[in-house]
Amino acid sequence: MISRPSIARDPANAIWTATRASAAQVRSTRVRRELITFTIMRRVWIVMLMLTAVGAIRCADPPEARDSEQVISHIPRQRVDSSAIAKVGYSKRRHVLEIEFVNGAIYRYLDVPSSVYRDLISAESKARFYDFNIKGKYRSARVQPRIKDKSAN
């Protein structure tokens, strides 16, 4: 009985088989890497899309306060020289900044460091400082204007 040489015993056949297997592994590895890269890029795209949506929501104008949630201010505000901002007030104890605009709207910004208030007061352009350093950076709420007591006059 004549025995056939097995693949492992035939050196020429073993090299050819190993080369063929190696080429298949390379293709398989390349496809696997492309699939992993595609999956990672898709996840990055989804995260970027979510961050963009969250950023757009956060930077939107603050929502109007409902009647039950109206904030009435007791923080004194001082006049400032600005084309867009009429008065500015700050509570050191509560870290609350209030800005009254020339159109009459008053907004309260929460958790504002005192350094931001000092920088706003000393800024050459208060409206520009507000746009770049306060608007959209701190939680805010619309404040109801104070109603002056008519009997005091």
Image: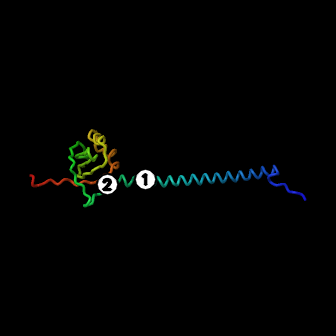
Q: Quadrant of residue 28?
A: bottom right
Report helix, strand or loop for mark 1: helix
Image quarter where the N terminus lies is bottom right
Q: Residue furthest right?
A: 1
Percent of width and height locating residue 37? 57, 52
Q: Residue furthest front?
A: 93
**Residue 59 in the image: above or below residue 67:** above
Front-most of 68 and 84? 68
Front-most of 31 and 140? 140
Q: CA distance from mark 1 to mark 2?
A: 18 Å
Q: Residue at x 29, y 45 (%)?
A: 127
Say the numbered circle drawn on residue 52: 1
Q: Earlier in the sequence, mark 1 or mark 2?
A: 1
Say the numbered circle drawn on residue 62: 2
Percent of width and height locating residue 40? 54, 52
Percent of width and height locating residue 38? 56, 54
Q: Residue at x 41, y 55 (%)?
A: 53
Taking the image as shown, residue 150 lies to the left or right of residue 90, namely left
